[in-house]
Amino acid sequence: MIRQKKIALINDVTGFGRCSVTVELPIISALKIQVCPLPTALLSVHTGFKNYFMDDFTDRMGDYIDSWQKNNLTFDAIATGFLGSAAQIEIVRRFIKNFPAVVIIDPVMGDHGKIYASYTKEMCRRMRELLEFADLVTPNLTEACELLGVAYPTGGVVSDSELATMAANIAAKTRGGRVIITGVTLDIDDGSNISNFIFDKGQINIVPSRRLGGDRSGTGDAFFAVVAASWLNGESLIDATGKAAEFVTKCIAHADKLNLAWNWGLPFEEFLTELH
């Protein structure tokens, strides 16, 4: 019998700025997987705007999850994004234990060598502990360094051998042994490319893509959504990563063409119908 897959998506819901659930839900849906959001917070705009409203959902997440349990819901996968507190990480830990499924963790902790101001040492420690449940982890270089407790490399430039060691060490902390270190600059590159380093149970691959423009909100969310959904649909990590890199590159190029502000995110809506 044909059955549609379901993914529980744990992340914040942001009204404007194209990030988190508002990016991931339509992309995953376009790839034919039902998305069931579990909100961690509600924001009017993301924190890259000067003025924003935020409603923390920590105290309501327990009742929300209880309702899912009482309705005997099940999921094929659980995907985690930005978590706002140590308490939320603990809630996610309990959720994973109570809803057996494939677990895909995007440890949204920082970028460009800096951990986000909202992340405490306790939260970083709890995030490392959460890895034990992961079948796939998708950190950027900053997050990979933090998960391992090692220094961020000078200028954010690394060798493939350094990445192999880092990815293997992160994979050893997981149950699935699969890691994608995203958006890295390799020391052998001339700066025109940005690469994604795949470690799949010991098998290593590098998927490069063109480096375009500067940072844009939601880029990592779009990349994660394509990878998670494609992999859950049975594609290899290499194919899923290549598809995600191509999709994001196309969106960034169109954002530049439209001259969008960085905090307006990616105009991914233009290309949703191309996903399959």
Image (spheres, rainbow, N blue to C red):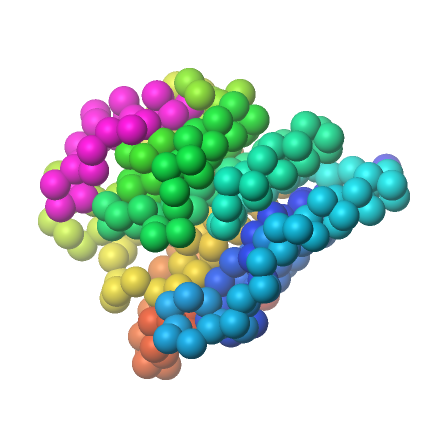
Can you say which quadrant of the picture contains the C terminus?
A: bottom right
Q: Is residue 31 visible?
A: no
Name the chief secondary structure element in magenta.
helix
The image quadrant of residue 146 is top left
Expressed as whole percent of the image width and height from the top left, the position of residue 2 reads 82, 41
Q: Residue furthest bottom?
A: 258
Residue depicted at x 52% and y 58%: 20
Q: Is residue 103 visible?
A: yes
Expressed as whole percent of the image width and height from the top left, the position of residue 261 reads 34, 77
User: On the rendered structure, is 56 left or right of 252?
Assistant: right
Is 155 contained in the magenta span?
A: yes
Query: Range of the magenta residues?
Result: 148-171
User: On the rendered structure, is 21 left or right of 118?
Assistant: right
Question: Is the residue 141 above or below the residue 248 in the image?
Answer: above
Expressed as whole percent of the image width and height from the top left, the position of residue 262 reads 34, 71
Can you say which quadrant of the picture contains the N terminus?
A: top right
Residue depicted at x 36% and y 60%: 249
Expressed as whole percent of the image width and height from the top left, the position of residue 70 reads 87, 41
Residue depicted at x 48% and y 27%: 129
Question: Is the residue 13 above or below the residue 224 in the image?
Answer: below
The image quadrant of residue 104 is top right
Is 64 contained in the magenta span?
A: no
User: On the rendered structure, is 133 left or right of 17?
Assistant: right
Q: Nearer the viewer, residue 71 or 251?
A: 71
